[in-house]
Image: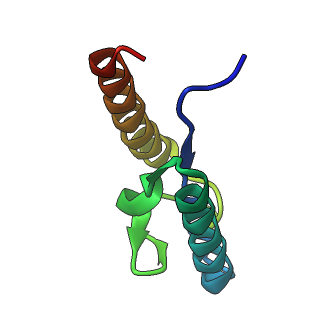
Amino acid sequence: MDASQVVISAVPPIDAAPALAAELNTALEALAQDEGWVWVDAPAGLRDGARFADGMTSDGLHPTETGARVLGEAIGAVVREVGRQEATAGG
């Protein structure tokens, strides 16, 4: 089955290598643009600059439960919006 729309998300920060996460996100965003996919910076709410904000990680790599909720809500909002647009367009 072909997807009518693809949603691709940024990756969360990597506190030990913030530039790596930033480079990966730049590449992912460019891929989304090139492919006509929907880009979402879901972990934006996890960041304080290039690193995790307080309370969003316990190890600098994995989100806490609160961080996971932030990610899920951001991705869910975009997926719902794409679904509404598809329904409106009759797709």
41 vs 80, left or right, is right
- Quadrant in which the C terminus appears: top left
Residue at the left extreme? Answer: 88
- Quadrant in which the N terminus appears: top right
Along the line of sight, the residue nearer the viewer: 52 or 87:
87
Establish if 63 lies above or below 27: above
The residue positioned 60% from the left and 81% from the top of the image is 18
Let me know if residue 53 appears in the view.
no
Residue at the right extreme? Answer: 1
Along the line of sight, the residue nearer the viewer: 86 or 63:
86
Establish if 49 lies above or below 77: below
Rendered location of residue 58, percent (x, y): 57, 59
Rendered location of residue 40, percent (x, y): 44, 52
Let me know if residue 26 appears in the view.
yes
86 vs 14, left or right, is left
Establish if 9 lies above or below 74: below
Along the line of sight, the residue nearer the viewer: 79 or 42:
79
The residue positioned 65% from the left and 63% from the top of the image is 61
Establish if 37 lies above or below 30: above
The residue positioned 53% from the left and 50% from the top of the image is 36
